[in-house]
Amino acid sequence: MNKDIIEKNPFDGIKVAVQANPSRMYFITIEEANKVMDACPNLQWRAIFALCRYGGMRCPSELLTLKWTDVNWERGRITVHSPKTERYQGKDMRQIPIFPELRPYLLEAFNQARDKLGYVITLCRKKNTNLRTCFKRIICKAHLKPWPKLFQNLRSSRETELTEKFPLHVVCAWLGNSQLVAAKHYLQVTEDHFKSAIIESTTPSAPNPKHVA
């Protein structure tokens, strides 16, 4: 049997489309988020969870590059460095607001930080640290069932929330994805959407003055 060595990958340059799988999407409610936060064992894990759930940051790539010098308390902004998208022009970094839900956990971590110029997340800098395993334990401790795509669904939940308050192009600029990717892989239909629609559709309309005797 001849075993010829191919010097060039015949599939180079062929883009593989990542298909969306709605069944693996899960919206983490504020109630669930609070339970997880209460189950976090220390302020570093509270910061990790807050930056993912309320800051919409990618874990671990964006978390591990974040330094305190990237946090501008006066302007209320965080500069996020994105290793995943840095190969695209102008996509190596972006800015996000210090959202009100995020601020107390970030401030807690800052006040306890020994190095005010160093990395925000110091807990998981070793290569053998398994964030997924640790995070699953925290979720179970909160008496919740671990959801699919543990960290991506935190980003997805935040992006879904933010689009309720801000234009999609603004949210995408903050979270560092395109509107197409957001619509296909991140934005979800939640129970609150259904509840809101039902309330609006069942509320009696005001009578037309012309039809009132």
Image: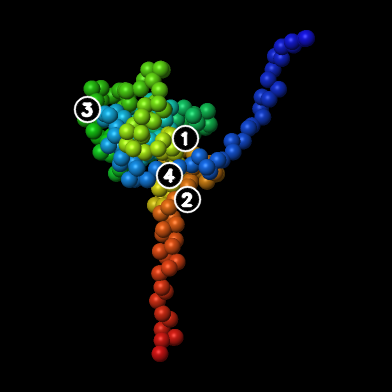
User: Callout 2: 10 Å neighbours few (<14), some, many (20+)?
Assistant: few
Q: Which mark is residue 27?
A: 4
User: Callout 3: 10 Å neighbours few (<14), some, many (20+)?
Assistant: few
- Screen quadrant of the N terminus: top right
* Amino acid type assigned to the residue bearing label 3 in the image: Gln
Residue contact between numbered discs 1 and 2, judged by CB atoms under 8 Å: no
Q: Residue at x 41, y 59 (%)?
A: 196
Q: CA distance from mark 3 to mark 4?
A: 31 Å
Please provide percent x and percent y for residue 5: 71, 11
Residue 13 vs 156, above or below: the answer is above
Q: Mark 2 vs mark 4: which is more N-terminal?
A: 4
* Amino acid type assigned to the residue bearing label 2 in the image: Val
Residue situated furthest bottom in the rendering: 213
Q: Mark 1 vs mark 2: which is more N-terminal?
A: 1
Q: Secondary structure at mark 3?
A: helix
* Residue 94 falls in image quadrant: top left
* Amino acid type assigned to the residue bearing label 4 in the image: Phe
Residue situated furthest left in the rendering: 111
Q: Residue at x 34, y 31 (%)?
A: 138
Please provide percent x and percent y for residue 26: 45, 42
Give whichever of 16, 200 is nearer the camera.
200
Q: Secondary structure at mark 4?
A: loop
Give whichever of 181, 137 is nearer the camera.
137
User: Callout 4: 10 Å neighbours few (<14), some, many (20+)?
Assistant: many
For label 3, the residue is 112
Q: Residue at x 31, y 30 (%)?
A: 45
Residue contact between numbered discs 2 and 4, judged by CB atoms under 8 Å: no
